[in-house]
Image (cartoon, helix red, strand yellow):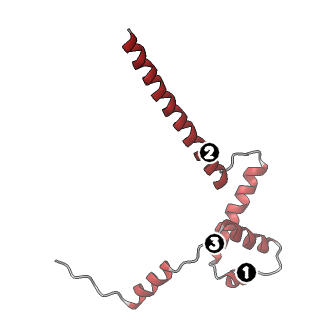
Amino acid sequence: MKTPRKPTPETYIKDIRRKTRRIFTAEQKILIVMEALRAETSVAELCRKHAIQESTFYKWNKEFLEAGKKRLSGDVVREATSDEVNQLREENRKLKETVADLVIRYDIIKKSLDIMD
């Protein structure tokens, strides 16, 4: 049986950083990229201000520009909003209930007709 190794200080710090990583919303990412597009500050300064890596910023910038490029080229397929998804789920639930009710009624009528014969 293997005994677990005691974590080194480096792995301990990496674990803490991994567990406390900030999650940026889409809106926050857009605001940061837009701030860079205004060119009022350098990318390095902007990244320090928001405590992000430059590679992360450039990834967001590329995604932002690619999304705009797709939209402008006529690709109008978009993700449904959470409200739309919830509305569709509710409609789907109601339709399933209606179908189940109709199946039950059909079975009842069919059985009653079989009894009459």
Quarter of image, res 15: bottom left
Image coordinates of residue 66 in percent, x first then y, are 70, 57
Give neighbour class at mark 2: few <14, some 14-19, many 20+ (Cα, 10 Å).
few
Give neighbour class at mark 1: few <14, some 14-19, many 20+ (Cα, 10 Å).
many
Residue depicted at x 67% and y 66% = 26
Q: The disc labelled 3 sits on which kind of residue? A: Phe
User: Are discs 3 and 2 less than 8 Å apart at CB?
Assistant: no
The residue that label 3 is drawn on is 24
Left or right position of 77 against 100: right
Q: Foreground residue, 52 or 80?
A: 80
Which mark is in front, 1 or 2?
2
Q: How far is mark 1 from mark 2, CA to CA?
A: 40 Å
Residue at the front extreme of this rendering:
116
Left or right position of 25 against 7: right
Residue depicted at x 73% and y 84% = 45
Q: Foreground residue, 102 or 37?
A: 102
Above/below status of 12 relative to 110: below
Residue 88: numbered disc: 2
Which image quarter is the N terminus in?
bottom left
Residue 36: numbered disc: none
N-terminal-most mark, 3 or 2: 3
Which element type, helix, strand or loop, lies under badge 2? helix
Which element type, helix, strand or loop, lies under badge 1? helix
Which element type, helix, strand or loop, lies under badge 3? loop
Residue depicted at x 39% and y 11% = 116
Quarter of image, res 42: bottom right
Q: The disc labelled 2 sits on which kind of residue? A: Leu
Q: The disc labelled 1 sits on which kind of residue? A: Leu
Residue at the left extreme of this rendering:
1
Residue 46: numbered disc: 1
